Image: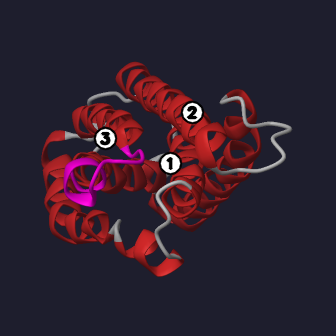
Amino acid sequence: MTLVVYGALSGLFFLLMLDLQNVLHYSAVAAGASLLPINGLMLVISPIAGRASERHGGKWPMAGGCLIAGIGMLLFARVQTGYSYWTSVLPAAIVFGTGLSILVAPLTTIALASIGESKAGLASGVNNAVARVAGLLATAIIPFAAGLGGAESLSGAILANGFTRATYISAGLCASGSAIAMVTISKEHK
């Protein structure tokens, strides 16, 4: 699940930053700052989601969080020329950030507990390595799959259209992550 979900996250963020800067002409600082609501949501919601998953298990928060994050990714498809920050970027960031906040703490908890408390460090290392590999694979594969492979310039309509396709791919990966959680996480995983 980490491979699929973190791949979706990395692929989306890579192209979102390019879209914000090269299509909507945000500065690098403005593009980064536009996503600060995601961090704020994670600071508030993640501890609550972590405590809830300790009591009730991580299966449902992980599956639901993936679906909510996927919906947020679909909303990022509206980040296009002519739309304001308030009507395109912010709503997508709020929905995406909410889903991410719900799923990250349970995912980490289950990954760390998966091979026993005595090997939690090993589990953490493997989970982090898988997340990094997912990011590398996604930044290579998702742009290609979205039709941006071989593009001479990542700007304008070419990038805007490719970015829209990439949001669909990333949302599909999140939906796959939700299905993986439903199939592989048992009730005893808390």
Depth check: 39 or 17 in front?
Answer: 17
Q: Position of residue 107 (x, y in %)?
A: 39, 48
Q: Secondary structure at mark 2?
A: helix
Q: Position of residue 45 (x, y in %)?
A: 17, 61
Q: Which residues are magenta?
A: 79-91
Task: Please tell me whether residue 133 is drawn above or below residue 178 in the rendered image.
Answer: below
Q: In the visual, does 29 lie left or right of 187?
A: right
- Residue type at tag 3: Gly
Q: Which tag is nearer the camera, tag 2 or tag 3? A: 2
Q: Quadrant of residue 125?
A: bottom right
- Residue 84 falls within the magenta-colored stretch: yes
- Residue 73 falls within the magenta-colored stretch: no
Residue displayed at 67% across by 43% down: 138
Total labels: the figure holds 3
> Which circle's residue, 1 or 3, is located before the other in the chain?
1
- Residue type at tag 1: Leu
Residue displayed at 27% across by 45% down: 99
> Which circle's residue, 2 or 1, is located before the other in the chain?
1
Disc 2 from disc 3: Cα separation: 18 Å
Q: Position of residue 147 (x, y in %)?
A: 71, 29
Q: Which residue is mark 2?
A: 161
Residue displayed at 20% across by 57% down: 86
Disc 2 from disc 1: Cα separation: 19 Å
Query: Outermost residue, bottom direction?
Result: 29
- Residue type at tag 2: Asn
Q: Which residue is mark 3?
A: 72
Depth check: 109 or 87 in front?
Answer: 87
Q: Quadrant of residue 76?
A: top left
Q: Which residue is mark 1?
A: 9
CA neighbours of label 3 inside 10 A, class few (<14), some (14 to 19), many (20+): many
